[in-house]
């Protein structure tokens, strides 16, 4: 349960609008995306936060691209304060531990990208914030998912929804493998969502 929304079998579909880095480093564009999510009647909007210096060293060619789309903390504060004006659940997907602490002050739930499934430090840090977790399991093996759940639960958080998604951009409809949702649900006895990467 997040705020007044109950997530699970037999309940209405819980729709999350994903902003990712579509704002391309422009805070006003991110505000527009959040407003659009609210106006589209999505239940939640997810934002992704990172510090370029935490993800790559300056010598890495990707560092320059990350810096271009990285929002300053002062801009993030304005955007997230703006988001609070709307009656929409705010989710945050941190890509580094520093971003976990920053987002925690503003969000209602955490999304963990599948790239952090095997990152125990990140899992523990997020679990200790005691907020609902949406755990990306796209491309993961069953034993990796099991281990990640165990780490999150051992750190004191059992409020976990697993998120299946084929990690290709864009994903072809025939590659979406929706039947895997049932398999994951039966295997781990948890609510399972779908990360749609179709164009």
Image (spheres, rainbow, N blue to C red):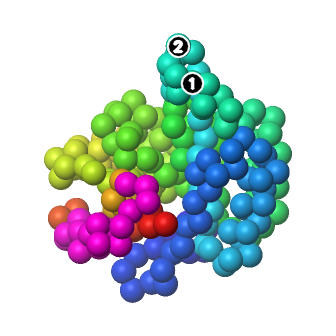
Residue 59 is tagged as 2
Q: Residue at x 69, y 45 (%)?
A: 24
Q: Is residue 102 visible?
A: yes
Cα gap from disc 1 to disc 2, whole angstroms: 7 Å
Q: Residue at x 62, y 56 (%)?
A: 19
Asked if marks 1 and 2 touch (Cβ < 8 Å), the reply is: yes
Question: Picture quarter containing residue 85?
Answer: bottom right
Question: Taking 90 as reference, is 9 above or below it?
Answer: below
Residue on which disc 1 sits: 63
Rendering coords of residue 138 (x, y %): 32, 54
Inspect the magenta stretch and tell me whether residue 29 lies in it: no
Magenta stretch bounds: 168-186
Rendering coords of residue 75 (x, y %): 80, 39
Q: Indicate left or right for 87 with 146 as reference.
A: right
Q: Indicate left or right for 99 with 79 as reference.
A: left
Rendering coords of residue 2 (x, y %): 55, 66
Q: Residue at x 60, y 31 (%)?
A: 65
- Residue reaching furthest top? 59
Mark 1, secondary structure of its residue = helix
Mark 2, secondary structure of its residue = loop
Question: Taking 61 as reference, is 99 above or below it?
Answer: below
Q: Indicate left or right for 140 with 107 as reference.
A: left
Q: Indicate left or right for 174 with 86 as reference.
A: left
Tell which of 21 and 123 is nearer to you. 21
């Amino acid at each position: 349960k997040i705020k007044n929304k109950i997530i699970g079998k037999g309940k209405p579909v819980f729709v999350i609008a994903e902003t990712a880095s579509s704002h391309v480093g422009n805070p006003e564009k991110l505000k527009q995306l959040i407003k659009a999510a609210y106006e589209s009647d999505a239940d939640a909007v997810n934002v992704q936060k990172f510090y370029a210096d935490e993800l790559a060293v300056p010598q890495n060619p990707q560092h320059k691209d990350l810096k271009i789309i990285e929002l300053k903390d002062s801009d993030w504060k304005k955007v997230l304060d703006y988001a609070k004006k709307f009656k929409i659940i705010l989710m945050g997907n941190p890509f580094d531990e520093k971003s976990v602490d920053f987002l925690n002050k503003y969000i209602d739930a955490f999304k963990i990208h599948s790239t952090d499934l095997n990152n125990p430090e990140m899992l523990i840090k997020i679990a200790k914030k005691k907020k609902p977790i949406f755990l990306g399991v796209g491309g993961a093996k069953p034993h990796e998912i099991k281990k990640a759940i165990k780490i999150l639960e051992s750190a004191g958080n059992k409020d976990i929804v697993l998120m299946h998604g084929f990690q290709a951009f864009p994903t072809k409809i025939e590659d979406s493998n929706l039947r895997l949702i049932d398999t994951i649900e039966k295997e781990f006895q948890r609510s399972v969502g779908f990360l749609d990467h179709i164009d």
